[in-house]
């Protein structure tokens, strides 16, 4: 958009043009043309910068990760307009520890739900599309996976409590796509277990995580 200062310059250029009417080779004509070209280039540059900024904003929106699943047949989904997901890789002496998480706050913070996936292995660069884990970790050096689920329970007396899947019985995690250069990954998962105190069982199925941007920490 041309600003007020730009419009004033154009007005001056126009007046200069009228003063030089009838003098085709008058220096003012050449100056007028040069100034007009320069300001047109500036205006075009600003428009291009605006378009580039809009494109960058769209790219940022595109990499907000999302997680969906069914927990005991009830829907779990992270919002696609808030960054309530996260992923990070910790690397130590060739071994890696990958964590992927997501919050569902559809029912509010007092009833928030949380899923955490963990993968252990050697040589993170070897992780590729199709890599999968279905062994519960007993030895981090051997590798495998872990998963956890937690939910806040809003009680009548406003005393919030939580219930957690803390006894994992089955786990399955698969990477469906990964870009090591852009540090983006997607995948699918399922797991089941129970709460050791209440005995309540949790079955998590149809899990997906998409476009997760992960960070890498070398220890």
Image (tube, rainbow, N blue to C red):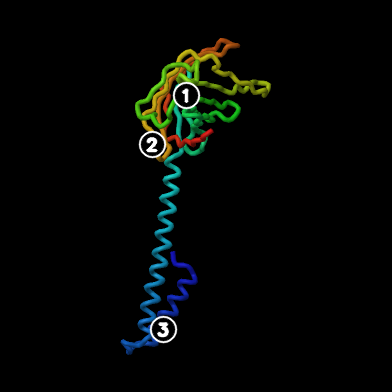
- Assign the N terminus to one quadrant of the image: bottom left
Please state which of residues 165 and 20 is positioned toward the viewer in this rendering.
165
Real-space CA distance between mark 2 and mark 1, rounded to the nearest whole angstrom: 19 Å
Q: Secondary structure at mark 2?
A: strand
State the residue position of label 3. Answer: 16
| Numbered label attached to residue 120 | 1
Left or right of 42 on screen, residue 202: right
In this rendering, the label closer to the viewer, 2 or 3: 2
Q: In the figure, residue 35 lies in which quadrant?
A: bottom left
> Of residues 208 and 12, which is closer to you in this image?
208
- Farthest residue, direction left: 24
- The reply to whether dot 2 and dot 1 touch (C-beta < 8 Å) is no
Q: Secondary structure at mark 3?
A: helix
Q: Would you call the spot at circle 1 few (<14 residues within 10 Å), some (14-19), or many (20 or more)?
A: many
- Taking depth in this image into account, of 175 and 23 the one nearest to the observer is 175
Disc 1 on helix, strand or loop?
Answer: strand
Residue 123 in sight here = yes
Q: Which residue is mark 2?
A: 179
Q: Nearer the viewer, mark 3 or mark 1?
A: 1
Does 33 sit above or below residue 145?
Answer: below
List x then y, in percent, for residue 136: 47, 16
Marks counted in the figure total 3
């Amino acid at each position: 958009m041309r600003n007020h200062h730009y419009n004033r310059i154009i007005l001056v250029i126009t007046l200069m043009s009228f003063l030089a009417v009838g003098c085709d080779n008058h220096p003012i004509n050449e100056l007028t043309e040069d100034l007009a070209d320069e300001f047109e280039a500036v205006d075009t540059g600003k428009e291009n910068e605006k378009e580039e900024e809009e494109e960058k904003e769209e790219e940022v929106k595109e990499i907000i990760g999302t997680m969906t699943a069914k927990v005991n047949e009830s829907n779990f989904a992270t919002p696609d307009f808030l960054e309530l997901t996260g992923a990070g890789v910790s690397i130590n002496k060739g071994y890696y520890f990958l964590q992927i998480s997501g919050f569902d706050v559809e029912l509010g913070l007092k009833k928030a739900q949380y899923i955490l996936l963990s993968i252990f292995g050697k040589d993170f660069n070897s992780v590729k599309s199709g890599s999968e884990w279905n062994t519960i970790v007993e030895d981090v050096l051997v590798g495998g996976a872990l998963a956890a689920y937690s939910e806040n329970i809003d009680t009548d007396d406003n005393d919030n409590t939580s219930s957690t899947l803390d006894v994992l019985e089955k786990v399955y995690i698969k990477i469906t796509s990964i870009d090591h250069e852009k540090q983006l990954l997607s995948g699918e998962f399922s797991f089941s277990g129970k709460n050791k105190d209440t005995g309540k069982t949790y079955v998590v199925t149809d899990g997906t995580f998409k476009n997760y941007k992960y960070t890498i920490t070398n220890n």
